[in-house]
Every structure is written in structure tokens, then in C-alpha cells.
């Protein structure tokens, strides 16, 4: 399992995730540069102490994201649980703590990988802490019930905690 514990430094030219390979680091930078409509060199990251306000079994780390030196949001690295295996995902929040991007970075199980679909993950965009129930607000996936329920629960819990946290 890739342990995504945070970025080592402030500039994307040196971005290296603790315990992750260069491909994973580059993927994060690519995703965020596309989402924020900026050049990759304009992104900077700072590891945030998760303190007590974000300590859950899902959260691995929190990064503050800067675009051209100005704060633009947070990236939370989290762990979900399928039937047999854990998986890793990232959630990017804007400054208002609203979900702007969800990406499953590592999925190891033979079943349930439908949750990695960009189309399915897009339904979380705009989520800001209200109701979020699997099968109601979030489309159910046959064969991926445990994985999908886990990521839904994680995003809801992390979003609420992040909103209440003074970072």
C-alpha cells in the first residue's frame, strides 16, 4: 500500500510524496494544475498539522495548496476500505471547504474498482457538508457497495471536520 503522508516541500518541481513514487507525485500536481487552470510551476504545497480537529482513521495527511503564492484550498489524503483491501484517495477542497475534485490514487482489490471512474467521482464536486448518502445523493454501484459506501462516508466525515477545523 502506498502511504501518502504529504509533500516534502513547497514547490512542485521538488514535490515528492512521502512513501509514494514520482508518478503519484506528478499525478497529484497534474490533477491540481488542470483543476485550478494554472501551470504546474505555480502550485505550492505545505503540510498542515492535522491536530485534533482532523484526526480520523481515514485521514492520512492534509496539504495546504497555494496558487502563485495565494492559498487556494486543501488536499486531503485518505484511506477507504473495500471488502478485502484498503484503497487511497485524494480530495481537493477550495477555500470554502467545498469538494472540487476526488481521485482514487490506489485501488488494489479485484472487485469494486468502478469507484475509480472519473464520471462516478464527479458527483462529489460541489459537496459542502450536507446530506450525502450512498444510494440517495450518491449513485449506487452494483458490485462496489462496500468501497463506494466507504468513500462516501469518508468524504462526508472529512468535509464536516475540515469545515469545523480552524486551519
Image (spheres, rainbow, N blue to C red):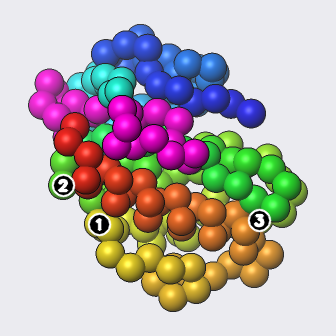
What residue appears at the point 33 percent right and 28 percent down from the top-left corner? 48
Mark identifier at residue 128? 1
Q: Is residue 8 above or below residue 76?
A: above
Q: State whether residue 130 is above or below residue 85.
A: below
- Residue 159 in picture, x, y percent from top left: 36, 57
Q: Where is residue 4 drawn, in percent x and y?
A: 57, 30
Span of residues in magenta: 50-72
Residue identifier under label 3: 112
Where residue 97 appears, as percent x and y from the top left, is 25, 54
- Secondary structure beneath dot 2 equals loop
Which residue is farthest bottom? 136
Choose top left, top right, bottom left or bottom right for residue 54.
Answer: top left
Residue closest to the eye, 57 or 40? 57
Categorize mark 3 by other alpha carbons within 10 Å: few (<14), some (14-19), many (20+).
some
Q: Which mark is residue 96?
A: 2
Count neighbours of disc 2 (C-alpha within 10 A) and say few if under 14, some if 14 to 19, many if 20 or more: few
Q: Is residue 150 left or right of residue 30?
A: right
Residue 40 appears in the picture as rendered: no
Residue at image position (85%, 55%) is: 84
Amino acid at each position: 500500500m502506498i502511504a501518502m503522508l504529504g509533500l516534502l516541500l513547497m514547490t512542485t518541481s521538488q514535490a515528492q510524496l512521502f512513501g509514494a513514487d514520482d508518478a503519484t507525485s506528478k499525478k497529484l500536481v497534474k490533477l491540481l494544475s488542470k483543476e485550478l487552470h494554472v501551470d504546474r510551476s505555480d502550485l505550492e504545497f505545505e503540510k498542515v498539522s492535522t491536530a485534533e480537529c482532523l484526526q480520523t482513521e481515514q485521514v492520512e495527511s492534509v496539504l495546504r495548496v497555494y496558487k502563485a503564492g495565494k492559498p487556494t484550498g486543501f488536499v486531503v489524503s485518505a484511506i477507504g476500505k473495500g471488502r478485502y483491501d484498503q484503497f487511497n484517495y485524494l480530495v481537493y477542497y477550495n477555500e470554502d471547504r467545498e469538494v472540487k475534485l476526488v481521485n482514487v490514487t490506489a485501488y488494489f482489490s479485484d472487485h469494486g474498482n468502478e469507484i475509480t471512474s472519473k464520471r462516478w467521482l464527479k458527483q462529489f464536486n460541489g459537496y459542502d457538508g450536507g446530506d450525502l448518502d450512498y444510494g440517495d445523493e450518491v449513485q449506487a454501484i452494483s458490485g462496489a457497495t462496500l468501497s463506494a459506501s466507504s468513500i462516501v462516508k469518508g468524504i462526508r466525515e472529512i468535509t464536516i471536520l475540515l469545515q469545523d477545523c480552524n486551519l
